[in-house]
Amino acid sequence: MQRETSAPRSQAQAAPPPAPADTRHAVRIENVDLVFHSSRSAEPVTALQDVSFEVAHQEFCAIVGPSGCGKSTLLNLVSGLTPPTSGRVYVNEEHVTGLVRDIGYVTQDSNLLPWLTVDQNIRLPLQIRKLPTEEQDRLVDQWIGMVGLEGFRDSYPHQLSGGMQKRCAIARTLVYDPPILLMDEPFGALDAMTKAVMQDTLLQLWDDQKKTVLFVTHDLSEALALSDRVIVMSRRPGRVKAASAVDIPRPRDVFHVSELREFAEQHRVLWDMFAEEISMGGLSK
């Protein structure tokens, strides 16, 4: 196709220069150390040492590493639950000095309130924020549909399967529209098939909502199937060993993504890093 051309513009008609790119990050961690002191041990434990990385807006970033390397601790730092010993944490370029309100946090346990129904669990954060009842009804209806829990609105957590409990927990977290989502091994306790279904559900929600996601997992295949970038942590004290972009096209089919050549190549590279840390004692707590 021939490109259309036009007469040169005069100086007065010249197009303005492009606006500078937005360099703000959703999450920024700068030179963070975290040392735990315990009455049961005379020696302090250094959990994290000189950790620095950024997460871009709408990026899906996975954190992997051996057990005890501080992956979950990083999420607690970002949410404001745990202050660093030194260094700084920023969320939307604001220095984190306490609990961050505009963050959703999904843990490995669903943490649903057992005396509340699916409807009531999902509605709870909206009630806390004192949204009008009509708006609560609209959002609860919307999210019950989005996570496939139609017909279970009045069910209690003990009446749900593990996967359904996780769907409810995700809906409860996303219903108030937090721009940043922290996920700490959310599917670790599920069987392989349910886990794949939940990964697929999460990718569909992310494609639609475009949240910034910081996702902790010990599963390299899960990290590659879901994320834009993988941060590999060293054994304790946790440091950033590497940060690797995931060059697998989107949208992704989590049920078949492992069949792709790009997946196999990147899995091999990440596994070599991961295995090195384990062989150096990374499985110790």
Image (cartoon, helix red, strand yellow):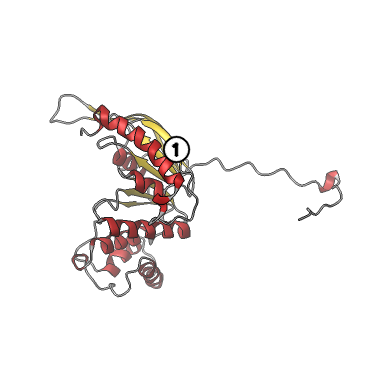
Q: Outermost residue toward the bottom?
A: 151
- Give the quarter of the image for residue 46: top left
Foreground residue, 50 or 248?
248
Residue at 19 percent across and 63 percent down: it is: 114
Q: Outermost residue toward the left?
A: 40
Q: Position of residue 246 (x, y in %)?
A: 46, 43
Q: Is residue 118 above or below residue 214?
A: below
Foreground residue, 37 or 223?
223
Q: Is residue 25 visible?
A: yes
Residue at 35 percent across and 46 percent down: it is: 221
Look at the image and tell me in which quarter the N terminus lies: bottom right
> Which residue does the numbered mark 1 point to in the structure image?
244
Residue at 24 percent across and 69 percent down: it is: 117
Instruction: Look at label 1 and name its amino acid.
Output: Ser
Seen in the image, is 11 located left or right of residue 29?
Answer: right
Foreground residue, 175 or 248?
248
Foreground residue, 263 or 39?
263
- Give the quarter of the image for residue 151: bottom left
Q: Position of residue 111 (x, y in %)?
A: 24, 56
Q: Position of residue 140 (x, y in %)?
A: 36, 69
Q: Position of residue 90 (x, y in %)?
A: 43, 39
Q: Is residue 228 visible?
A: no
